Image (cartoon, rainbow, N blue to C red):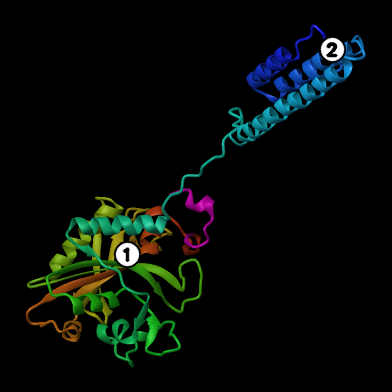
Amino acid sequence: MSDINIASIKEEIAKSVAEAKTREELEALRVKYLGRKGALADITQTLSTMAPEQRPEFGRQINEFKKEVLDIFSRKEKDLGSAGAREAVSFVDIGMPGIAQEIGRMHPLTQIIKEICTIFSRLGFIIVEGPEIETEENNFTGLNIPLDHPSRDAFDTFYLKDKKLLLRSHTSPVQIRTMKSRKPPLAVVVPGRVYRPDALDASHSFMFHQIEGFLVDKNIKFSDLKGTLEMFAKSVFGKDIKMRFRPHFFPFTEPSAEVDISCIICKGKGCSVCGRKGWLEVLGSGMIHPNVFKHVGYDPDKYTGFAFGMGVERIAMLKYGINDIRLFYENDLRFLKQF
Ligand SMILES: [Zn+2]
């Protein structure tokens, strides 16, 4: 029998292999024990020095040893293999530049809508929204715009296949909806999208945004309207602006007025933005017409109220000095990133 103790070598290999932490370490052990100058080669070498009668038994031991050692290595290889895969998944190169996360922001129109609604909320107005597909009654007749009224031309709009339904041409139908479902006192602002058959150019769009506001109670006077709008205009455009009310016609208010502010560019001296007039038109307003109250079942002798409506795009264009309405809808980040 050889003085080589196969059992203790196997034990040593098992121990070393168990301690190996990487494929490289395992590979080094494979060379050390199973390579051309490794332990297995040494053992096999001794076979030739043995007496012939001892060789078969020792040969059998060597074969068994070889099989067991190969098993030890292949089991370890599997272990390291799955661990290696896990390592690859969680591998993080801390020297690599990160993926930049762009911080989003609100669209300038959304910002203006929020700002305006907040101003009126502070005065106790509630925010109500309505559908963009409206009935002819809510959009026109309920607002004292009869079928044959010439003012209807200006807002005539997109009708659906069912001729009684249309895309609303203003946010005013929400006045009708709200007044029909609630009783005064009411103080409401209505932001939303509206539609008109206008061709797209620098100052017109077939779709734009409005904010409507109305207040109904006993003893509401034109001075209440004036005070409310002055507070609004100064909050949005600055304390130094002046306001003026110009008589105007709207079917759903009487009396009606268009409201101008002193030009924020030239401070009233006259410039190209205000067309040398020194004034900028910002909204329409008036005292709610008694016919509107009659339509919703309010007693016009008991209640009075005011209403106003403004184009959100127009307010945003004046506030930020934007000269083309189309910029709001093109989603060009070079534009949107400025707000
Ligand atoms: Zn001006």
Disc 1 residue crowd, few under 14, some 14–19, many 20+, Cα 10 Å: some
Looking at the image, which is closer to me, 6 or 132?
Answer: 6
Disc 2 residue crowd, few under 14, some 14–19, many 20+, Cα 10 Å: some
Quadrant into which the N terminus falls: top right
Rendered image: mark on residue 282: 1
The residue identified by callout 2 is 42
Looking at the image, which is closer to me, 15 or 241?
Answer: 15
Looking at the image, which is closer to me, 126 or 141?
Answer: 126
- Inspect the magenta stretch and tell me whether residue 277 lies in it: no
Q: Which residues are magenta?
A: 328-339
In the rendering, at what x and y percent does residue 293 appear?
Answer: 17, 82
**Mark 1: secondary structure:** strand
Q: Residue at x 18, y 64 (%)?
A: 226
Picture quadrant where residue 71 is located: top right
Picture quadrant where residue 82 is located: top right
Looking at the image, which is closer to me, 81 or 159?
Answer: 81
In the rendering, at what x and y percent does residue 267 appear?
Answer: 32, 53
Q: Residue at x 15, y 84 (%)?
A: 297
